[in-house]
Amino acid sequence: MSRIGWLPALLLLVFCLAGADVVQAESLTWNVRNDHPNAVSLEFYSDDGRTSWPGDGEVYVLDDGQDHAFPIQCDLGERICYGAWVRGDETQYWGVGKDGAQSCESCCYRCDGGETPLIVITE
């Protein structure tokens, strides 16, 4: 077989191998309500520590006692945890707290295109 005959097969092989590392994008919708008397900051953290939502040093602020839905884009199967804390007092926290510094198994969900049950932040 000539070199030109191998070119399509080689390109197909490269394409297939390159696609093996592609991670599927998915979403996870977090449902959260703050019933605490103080406003709280809320952030979501990837278990690998590289990604947070909303990201860029920002946080979601919950101060109205209403149910809120936070759809985030994540990698299929990625483990995402929530952290919340009283604004101005990081010692009062829920989930993994600020910057994901605390341990918590029941505050993490897999990115699977679904949504979490309602998480209620209370005293």
Image: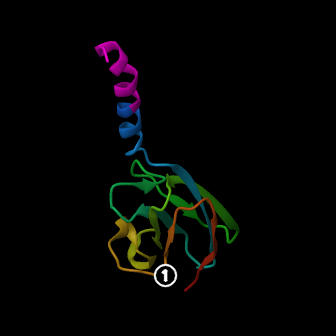
The image quadrant that residue 50 belongs to is bottom left
In magenta stretch: residue 116: no
Rendered location of residue 64, percent (x, y): 67, 67
Query: Is residue 5 found left or right of 120 in the rendered image?
Result: left
Question: Which residue is depicted at the point 66% across and 64% down?
Answer: 68
Task: Name which residue lies at 45% across and 52% down.
Answer: 58
Position of residue 43 relative to residue 34, above or below, is above
Question: Outermost residue, right direction?
Answer: 66
Bounds of the magenta segment = 1-12
Badge 1 marks a residue whose secondary structure is loop
Closer to the camera, 43 or 28?
28
Would you say residue 8 sits in the magenta stretch?
Answer: yes
* Mark 1 burial class by Cα count in 10 Å: few <14, some 14-19, many 20+: few
- Please give left or right for residue 57 compared with residue 75 in the image: left
Seen in the picture, residue 15 relative to 44 is either above or below; the reply is above
| Residue 13 at x, y percent in the picture | 37, 33
Q: Position of residue 69 (x, y in %)?
A: 66, 61
Q: Residue at x 64, y 66 (%)?
A: 115
- The residue at the far bottom in this view is 123
Residue 35 locus on image (x, y percent): 63, 78
**The C terminus - image quarter:** bottom right
Q: How is the image coloured?
A: rainbow
Location of mark 1 (residue): 106
Question: Residue at 32% of width from left, 72% of height from top?
Answer: 101
Judge by depth and name the residue closer to the eye, 12 or 5: 5
Q: Which secondary structure is most common in the magenta stretch? A: helix
Considering only vertical position in the picture, is 34 above or below 42? below
Q: Quadrant of residue 36?
A: bottom right
Q: Amino acid at mark 1?
A: Ser
As drawn, the residue found furthest toward the left would be 3
